Image (cartoon, grey):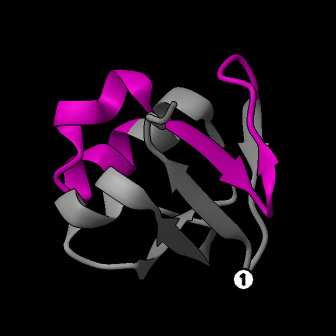
Amino acid sequence: MEIEHGVTVKVLFFAQAKELAGTRESTLYLPQKLSYGQLLNIITEKFNLEKIKKNILLAKNEEVCEDTIDIDLSECDNIAVIPPLSGG
């Protein structure tokens, strides 16, 4: 994907996402505006998260994103990758 107007964001991984990605955080250069689905696809492909893709939540700056919206990104935003949580 060629990005004409992009920004660099920090991607934070938690729990199983952190294990699969092999890192706690990384950076990505992304378009300033993209759909939730596009963002999810980019992150899952780049960081080997296909196995849990259907259960991941994405949050921008600590606010969970709705999967039906376009996401406007700014330089230095944080994107959290939140995998399914288990517990009891």
- On the image, the x and y values in percent for residue 84 come to 44, 34
Give the residue type that dot 1 points to: Cys
Residue lying farthest front? 88
Q: On the image, which quarter does residue 28 sit in?
A: bottom left
Residue identified by numbered label 1: 76
> Does the rendering let one see residue 2?
no
Category of crowding for the residue at label 1, using alpha-carbon neighbours closer than 10 angstroms: few (below 14), some (14–19), many (at least 20): few
Q: On the picture, is 84 further left or further right than 65?
A: left
* Residue range (magenta): 41-69
Count the marks. 1
- On the image, the x and y values in percent for residue 12 come to 52, 70
Please determine whether, in this image, residue 75 is positioned above or below residue 58: below
> Does the rendering let one see residue 52?
yes
Please determine whether, in this image, residue 24 is positioned above or below residue 30: below
Please determine whether, in this image, residue 64 is positioned above or below residue 30: above
**Which residue is located at x 50 percent, y 43 percent?**
39
Q: On the picture, is 72 further left or further right than 49?
A: right
- On the image, the x and y values in percent for residue 29 come to 48, 73
Residue 20 falls inside the magenta stretch: no
Please determine whether, in this image, residue 16 is positioned above or below residue 35: below
- On the image, the x and y values in percent for residue 24 come to 39, 79
**Which residue is located at x 68 percent, y 71 percent?**
78
Residue 52 falls inside the magenta stretch: yes
